[in-house]
Amino acid sequence: MTLVSEISEFELISRLEKVLKSSGTVTDAQIKLGIGDDAAVLTPQSKNQVISSDALVENVHFIYDQISMYNLGWKALASNYSDIAAMGCEPLAVSITLGVKKNQKIEDLENIYEGFGAITSKYGGSIIGGDIVKSKEFFISISVIGQNNQTSTLMRSNAVPGDLIIVSGEIGSSAAGLKLISDFDISLYENESEKSSKFLPFLTSHFKPEPQIELGGKILDCGITTCTDVSDGLLRDLSNICDSSKVSAIVNVDKIPTDTNLKSIFPNEWIQLCLSGGEDYQLLFTGNHNNIKQLQENATSQITIIGEITKISDTQISLVDNSNNKIKFDHKGWDHFKES
């Protein structure tokens, strides 16, 4: 075991670079110069470029001994990739800054970079550099440049009354995974053989989310223009669309797609997990009937209609069930600076 304090910064960078090379990540032809100089050099040929930045801080966004370092690397980059997907783009270049503690194990950092390498191998993008600094709290700060060759990108501000509201995948699973860890002392994902199979989808969703890169591109291809990702909770993220587009919405809670075991494991909490849980990293989008029908015919991912955009009103988001009974729910979702 080697600690950060026992080697130099350049030795650490060299070791982490070796991890990336061994992971089989391929450098895009548009990356003229990556790691190894004062700055990276890009020669992109795309019509649109987007950039997303995000940070994960120990004891704020994760507990060090409750997640494997490999999954921490994967998840840190997946959250940024999800933002890129929500713009209808693909990842091109990744810059990573680590704030490391002097007593941190080098092997832990190498495992994090194995996670980085695995997700870039699967979804694209090249790690082009970043920075390493000494810190009292461990953190990972990531910026991702994405691109597409379309005439536009997806945005939150284009929803209009009459649009259908659609979500991909299953909602509430990541929050359920977090609750299992917190309430039932189900800790490291690696011990999956010891856990009931009904818990595994929730733990996987929480520890190793899959960014919807391909679906984001198909959404844009079908003429849909309004999209965001479900990172802060379904209601919070739909509220962002409503704010940006100056509209309101009706959501049928019974139509929100969930894992088959969510309601049985959490009979009294499943609605809260779905509506305000967050970190599902699925796509939430709106579009007219014709464009949604075209997407349904072409998408390989699961997509579900859960509601409709309406004219702006005093009630920004109305919740109903299959019988059209109104549901009261005030807990909107995660806010970094407020107690949610």
Image (tube, rainbow, N blue to C red):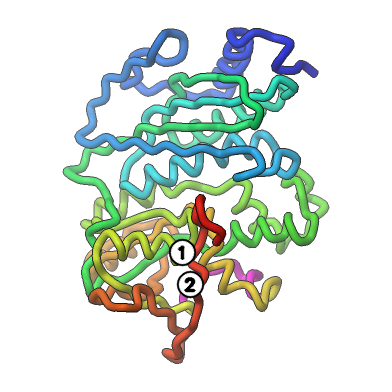
Q: Amino acid at mark 1?
A: Leu
Q: Choose between 155 and 192: the one closer to the eye.
A: 155
Residue 49's x, y, as percent?
27, 35
Q: Is residue 288 visible?
A: yes
How many marks are shown on the rendered structure?
Answer: 2
- Within 10 Å of the Cα at label 2, are there few (<14), some (14-19), or many (20+) other Cα atoms? many
Q: Choose between 232 and 27: the one closer to the eye.
A: 232
SS assignment at label 1: helix
Labels 2, 1: front one: 1
Is disc 2 in contact with disc 1, using a CB cutoff of under 8 Å? yes
> In the drawing, does residue 43 fall left or right of residue 137?
left
**What residue is shown at x 75% (from left), y 22% (from top)?**
103
Residue 189's x, y, as percent?
72, 46
- Return the mark for residue 256: 2
- Within 10 Å of the Cα at label 1, are there few (<14), some (14-19), or many (20+) other Cα atoms? many
> In the drawing, does residue 113 fall left or right of residue 244?
right
Q: Which residue is mark 1?
A: 234
SS assignment at label 2: loop
Vertically, is 63 above or below 2? below
Range drawn in magenta:
255-263
**The C terminus, quarter of image:** bottom right
**What residue is shown at x 68% (from left), y 24% (from top)?**
101
Distance between the Cα atoms at labels 2 and 1?
A: 10 Å
**The N terminus, quarter of image:** top right
- Residue pushed farthest right? 194
Q: Choose between 328 and 28: the one closer to the eye.
A: 328
Vertically, is 117 above or below 133? below
> In the drawing, does residue 160 fall left or right of residue 285?
left
**What residue is shown at x 30% (from left), y 37% (from top)?**
50
Vertically, is 98 above or below 153? above
Residue 176's x, y, as percent?
64, 62
